[in-house]
């Protein structure tokens, strides 16, 4: 089978440094970047360490200026001033020489501001060319900042991050609106995005603090929006102490908490499992006289739904429907038990964040006015019904929203999509399609998310043909182009019907349409080949994933590669993969060891099980004593039932009874009940004649002593007759002979 996996465009590279320091200009400038606007152009730079003129003379050192070059630059600059970006781009591509810094910076700025996939690719191609020709110093901070914003908005978060980091290393300090946009995107990203968000924020703030003159860094210092972005990262991580530290630092830069800051604090309370504090966040907003918004009330409903407390969410919405302003009082009464027992490990943090929670006022604050629930709040409650499988309540809520007098409460495409999701989750695909048809009839257009949910429903029900038809309908009739989620869903659907060829077809179709694969795309395709017994193809996909700078290889991808070889019993190849994992800084987890154990069982190499158990035993969590783990040592491991049961099964079958007892002891320590019945059956069927030979030499019998002791101990654990009881274990004689002799 031929796999078509073209290499990604180098212009989208995010892992390589696009701004090498070895050829940075001798003059370093601190440059501000204005908020992107149709008329934004590079502003006057501030000199930081420059003593010469601000005019960059490096152009004359590298490329001699000719009359022809000057004329070309003048034409290009005139086009850029008239904002004829397309014509300017064509002029740039037709010229063999590099334009001057002003033209290059303006062109990159205007391309970035267009904020389209094509314009971003063009801007990145300019950066790539300058990097190859070691002329990146021709771009000013404004153009680079706009490029970072455009990349972040387009989902190229890694590239945007690399741009900001390289600007810092090259002596530039971007405008706060540029670097905070990247921080915000990272905070909402998966994997280690929130952690990287905090690191990037800290890097910029450290640079800002180095300048004693506040006027120099006035446009780069963090504002409230920047702090809200990094606080959101802390909330996503549940890092309460870092949240408090950053919250307290806001005043250093004159940033005042706003309503969004406290909305993020609601999320932090939810992550920290502090439902009792939600009402105090609302009260704090009112006490600080911060203008309240519907997003705050929506965040509260979402938090209660997230806790599974649908009753409080319902009562809160009902109070809003009745126009009541004493919402704080209602929430206190509904959560009285939580308020009376609110001790937690992070009490000191929340006491400082919410001082009003220490000594609550006797009379809770009133809302400044009545707030009627909108469609977003109703839809959030519907999602709670959906999560609990209450399909009828979800549909009934939709009907109730249709009858509302307030137009803000009418169901929108998100509401209908939630109903579609509930029906798909319940397996009612026909009813889900009826809702889709109704959306078209009443003029509420379905979006890509709606179709992706339906695609997933068909794939889960193994109706791949209907999924393909829906994909065609989505593109042709609804004129909605499928995205990477659409194709990932279809690839996963092909796996469910064991169609690796179909999975590869969808993957290549996605690439042909210019849709960049995600980490899920690669690992899902790897899964298709692993499950179909084609580990080499899975390895080929993995290699493509490694070369793609837009994705970051994680432990899931490594494990899928290990799984592919283990399913074929190719233990040596799997062990080599595990060794590569470790060399790349990834430690095997329970899934990795589980695959190896299954592969060892399939390959019938019990000796490998002993080596595997030794490694697992060294990493098992030690509960009897607190041990200071070395930072260079692998993290502790908590094995699961599947892993330990497989290893125990191998050891019992191979008569490694001492190791089997060690594994069983580990199972009991971790609260996993061993399957004693299964092990007893294996012992009786395979080892009932063990140590019964009358003709073994004395030397051989002596060598068996230790193994026999282990066997007797194992029989004792099984509850079979053994030497510990002083009795003889016998089965029915075979052919009149006593099998124990």
Image (cartoon, rainbow, N blue to C red):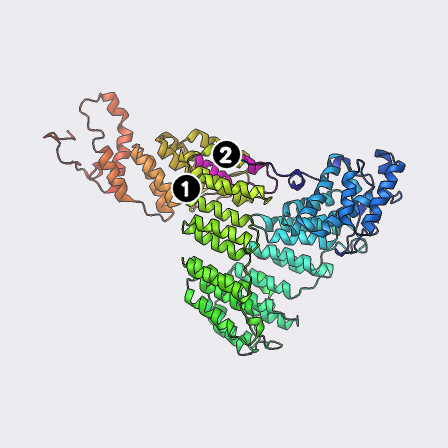
| Place of residue 125 in the rendered image (x, y in percent of width and height, measured from the top left) | 71, 41
Q: Which range is magenta? A: 543-564
Q: How many marks?
A: 2
Give the CA separation, mark 2 to mark 1.
18 Å
Report the front residue among 412 and 342.
412
Give the overall secondary structure of the magenta segment.
helix
| SS under mark 2 | helix
The crowding category of the residue bearing disc 2, from other C-alpha atoms within 10 Å (few below 14, some 14 to 19, many at least 20), is many
Question: Is residue 597 in the magenta section?
Answer: no
| Place of residue 634 in the rendered image (x, y in percent of width and height, measured from the top left) | 50, 39
Q: Residue at x 61, y 53 (%)?
A: 187
Q: Residue 63, which numbered label?
A: none
Q: List the residue tagged with mark 1.
A: 498
Image quarter of residue 299: bottom right
| Residue 357 visible within the image | no
Q: Residue 539, which numbered label?
A: 2
Q: Earlier in the sequence, mark 2 or mark 1?
A: 1
């Amino acid at each position: 089978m031929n796999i078509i996996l073209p290499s990604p465009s180098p212009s989208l590279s995010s892992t390589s440094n696009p701004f090498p320091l070895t050829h940075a200009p001798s003059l370093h400038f601190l440059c501000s970047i204005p908020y992107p606007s149709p008329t934004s152009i590079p502003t006057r730079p501030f000199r930081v360490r420059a003593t010469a003129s601000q005019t960059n003379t490096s152009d004359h050192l590298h490329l001699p200026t000719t009359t022809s070059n000057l004329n070309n630059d003048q034409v290009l600059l005139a086009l850029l001033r008239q904002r004829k970006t397309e014509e300017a781009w064509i002029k740039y591509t037709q010229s063999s020489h590099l334009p001057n810094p002003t033209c290059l910076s303006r062109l990159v700025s205007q391309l970035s501001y267009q904020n389209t996939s094509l314009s971003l690719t063009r801007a990145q191609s300019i950066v790539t060319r300058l990097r190859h020709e070691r002329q990146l110093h021709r771009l000013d901070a404004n153009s680079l900042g706009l490029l970072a914003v455009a990349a972040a908005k387009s989902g190229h978060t890694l590239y945007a991050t690399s741009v900001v980091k390289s600007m810092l290393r090259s002596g530039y300090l971007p405008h706060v609106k540029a670097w905070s946009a990247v921080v915000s995107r990272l905070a909402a990203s998966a994997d280690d995005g929130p952690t990287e968000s905090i690191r990037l924020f800290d890097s910029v703030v450290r640079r800002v603090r180095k300048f004693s003159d506040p006027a120099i860094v006035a446009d780069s210092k963090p504002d409230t929006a920047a702090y809200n972005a990094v606080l959101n990262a802390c909330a996503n991580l549940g890092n309460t102490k870092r949240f408090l530290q950053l919250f307290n630092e806001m005043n250093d830069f004159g940033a005042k908490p706003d309503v969004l800051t406290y909305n993020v604090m609601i999320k932090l309370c939810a992550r920290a499992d502090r439902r009792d504090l939600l009402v105090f966040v609302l009260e704090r907003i009112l006490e600080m006289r911060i203008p309240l918004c519907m997003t705050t009330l929506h965040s509260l409903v979402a938090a209660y739904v997230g806790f599974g407390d649908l009753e409080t969410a319902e009562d809160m919405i009902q109070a809003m429907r009745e126009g009541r302003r004493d919402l704080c009082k209602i929430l206190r009464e509904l959560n009285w038990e939580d308020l009376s027992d609110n001790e937690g490990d992070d009490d000191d943090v929340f006491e400082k964040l919410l001082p009003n929670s220490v000594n609550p006022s006797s009379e809770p604050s009133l809302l400044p006015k009545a707030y009627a629930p909108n469609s977003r709040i109703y839809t959030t409650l519907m999602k709670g019904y959906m999560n609990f499988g209450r399909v009828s309540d979800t549909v009934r809520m939709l009907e109730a929203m249709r009858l509302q007098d307030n137009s803000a409460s009418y169901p929108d495409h998100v509401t209908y999509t939630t109903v579609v999701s509930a029906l798909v989750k319940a397996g009612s695909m026909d009813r889900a399609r009826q809702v889709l048809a109704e959306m078209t009839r009443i003029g509420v257009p379905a979006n890509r998310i709606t179709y992706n949910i339906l695609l997933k429903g068909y794939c889960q029900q193994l109706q791949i043909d209907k999924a393909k038809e829906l994909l065609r309908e989505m593109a042709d009739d609804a004129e909605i182009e499928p995205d990477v989620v659409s194709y990932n869903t279809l690839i996963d659907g092909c796996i469910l019907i064991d169609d690796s060829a179909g999975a590869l077809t969808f993957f290549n179709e996605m690439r042909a349409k210019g849709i960049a694969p995600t980490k899920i795309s690669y690992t899902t395709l790897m899964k298709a080949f692993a499950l179909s017994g084609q580990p080499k193809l899975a390895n080929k996909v993995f290699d493509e994933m490694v070369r793609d700078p837009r994705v970051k290889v994680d432990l899931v991808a490594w494990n899928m590669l290990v799984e592919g070889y283990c399913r074929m019993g190719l233990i040596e190849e799997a062990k080599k993969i595990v060794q590569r994992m470790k060399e790349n800084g990834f430690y095997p987890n329970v899934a990795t060891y589980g695959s190896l154990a299954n592969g060892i069982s399939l390959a019938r190499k019990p000796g490998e099980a002993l080596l595997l158990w030794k490694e697992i035993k060294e990493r098992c969590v030690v509960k009897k004593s607190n041990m200071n783990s070395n930072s260079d040592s692998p993290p502790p491991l908590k094995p699961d039932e599947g892993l330990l049961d497989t290893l125990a099964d191998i050891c019992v079958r191979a008569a490694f009874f001492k190791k089997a007892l060690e594994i069983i002891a580990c199972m009991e320590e971790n609260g996993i009940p061993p399957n004693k019945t299964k092990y007893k059956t294996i012992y009786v069927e395979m080892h009932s004649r063990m140590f019964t030979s009358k003709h073994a030499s004395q030397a051989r019998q002596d060598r068996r002593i230790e193994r026999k002791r282990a066997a007797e101990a194992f029989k004792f654990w099984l509850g079979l007759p053994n030497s510990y009881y002083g009795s003889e274990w016998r089965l029915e004689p075979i052919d009149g002979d006593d099998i124990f002799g």
